[in-house]
Amino acid sequence: MLCRHLSRRHGAKYAEYLRFTQPSQPEPTQSSIVNFTAGAGSQSSDSIAARSSSTSTYSRTSTRAKHLMQSLLDNVIIGCGLPVSLVDHPKTCKFLSDMDARYDPPCRQTVTQTLVPKSVQTQKDALRAELDKCNSISLTTDVWTDRRMHAYLGITVHALVGGNPKSNLLAFRTLTGSHTGQRIADEIDAVVREFDVKDKIRCVVTDNASNMLKAMYLFFPGADDSSYQAVDAQVDDALLWEDLPEDEAAISDTGGRIACFAHSLQLVVRGRLEKAATVLRPAMGKVSKLANVAHQSQLFRSAYEEKFGTGKSIPATNDTRWNSVYRQLQVIVDMDQTKLADLLRESSHENLVLTTKDFSVLQEVVDLLHPFAEATDLTQGENILTISAVIPTILSLRIFLRQMSTSVRFHAAAVQELLNQLHERFFHVLTRINVELPATACTSRTLAFDLDVFMLASAIDPQYGFRWLQDHPGAADVKDGLRHRITGIIYD
């Protein structure tokens, strides 16, 4: 600590100290220990200059120093996501000195122990004051694990502030131990009590993981406990992207939890992709191996970029995101197939060349999944209202699938299965808006979209209003009855 302080605050003295402690590199003018500790009269000109310079630096309490310090914290460390240790790096100190020779930046300990906690508290106080003015709020929450196997819980708060929708990060916490429903519920409860907003919460949006459902049952009173026995799966296991049977998911009657639509749509498509493996397997196998070669072979990557452009690549897939498969296939089918075939032959990968049928199969599945990818991107937007898009999206996808069923060559079974999945997963919301479903549709895999909030949100959103009724398959009197029912609920 002493050496670091000398190096940062008393550069000339530190240089003399190093010369004194390294006798193997003597200098004719090397100072003795007496001179090193003597008064100003015996100090070197460098030491005097350094001290003179230090007396001209900004005071820590000056307006200029405070402004630069806050800007360094907000715009460089936090804004750019750079490590706190950056402030101690000699090059950073040199840059800041060149920018303003009178500015003396804080050390890492000051940033870590004082500035960051103070900034966090300031942000919390501002957010708390803002939430105090709100009568109702909603939350979104999720748990995930990073590549180092560290788990985190994130909670976002959403509210109307002055008539404008606004979202803020409410908490971001590490989550150690087993990710049980009880543990998640306790963490969420601690956060909302810290901000004193528990009585203002109208709903919490989560995925369909069993432990998150259990957490919501514990967080919101009044739910039936009969369906929640030993539902304590860990969030980072294979159950993350599986939904529960209807009796285990029927928690929405409390009006507390709302299922994440983007994740629910993931279940619709992923279930179909797995069942369509037989048709897709030959072409998908080639694409998967091609992507592996592109990411693992430096020689192939160089040849690939030479053919298709620097920086071009084939996206990798993610097991928990079906749209990563879609994006990978989209890149492949958009390529110049002649160039791709030539590249594969030149690099001794003739077995990966796509046949005419392979390409047709891939092109058709890309066309089939394109609207689902658009719907996923739309309903997981960060700066727009998304709940109002749920019903219009479901109705649009239903029409699209019915149209595709008459034109597909290779994936007729996949189209029908996607339609079945759409009916089953969103059974409640479709029956709530009086859509007649086939007798074969069942509720065993429904995702409990059974709240009026979905049709009310669509009706009061100027972007949709009642225009989504154009895609409703019912007769005119059915649509009129639905419009009057929704209007009555709004005015009540």
Image (cartoon, grey):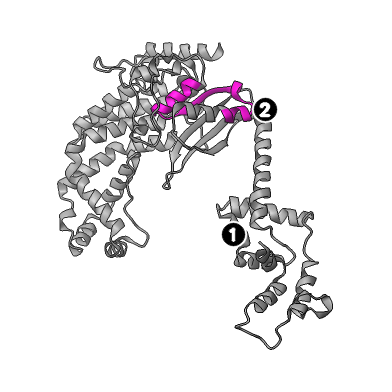
Q: For the residue marked with disc 2, what is the amino acid? A: Asp
Is residue 226 shown left or right of residue 487?
left
Give the residue at x 17% y 38%: 279
Quadrant including the C terminus: top right
Q: Quadrant of residue 327?
A: top left
| Mark-to-mark CA distance, 2 and 1 | 37 Å
State whether residue 4 appears in this view: yes
Front-lying residue, 97 or 232: 232
Range of the magenta residues? 190-218
Quarter location, residue 149: top left
Q: What residue is rendered at 28% in x and 46% in y?
A: 329
Nearest to the observer: residue 438 or residue 469: 438
Residue 87 magenta-highlighted: no
Above or below residue 185? Residue 227 is above
Q: Is residue 225 depicted above or below 13 in this figure?
A: above
List the single residue furthest toward the bottom.
Answer: 28
The N terminus, quarter of image: bottom right
Disc 1 marks which amino acid?
A: Leu
Is the C-beta separation of discs 2 and 1 under 8 Å?
Answer: no
Q: Which residue is mark 1?
A: 86
Is 204 included in the stretch rendered in magenta? yes
Between 128 and 384, the one nearer to me in the picture: 128
Q: Is residue 388 visible?
A: no
Mark 2, residue position: 132
Image position, residue 43 (x, y; %): 79, 78
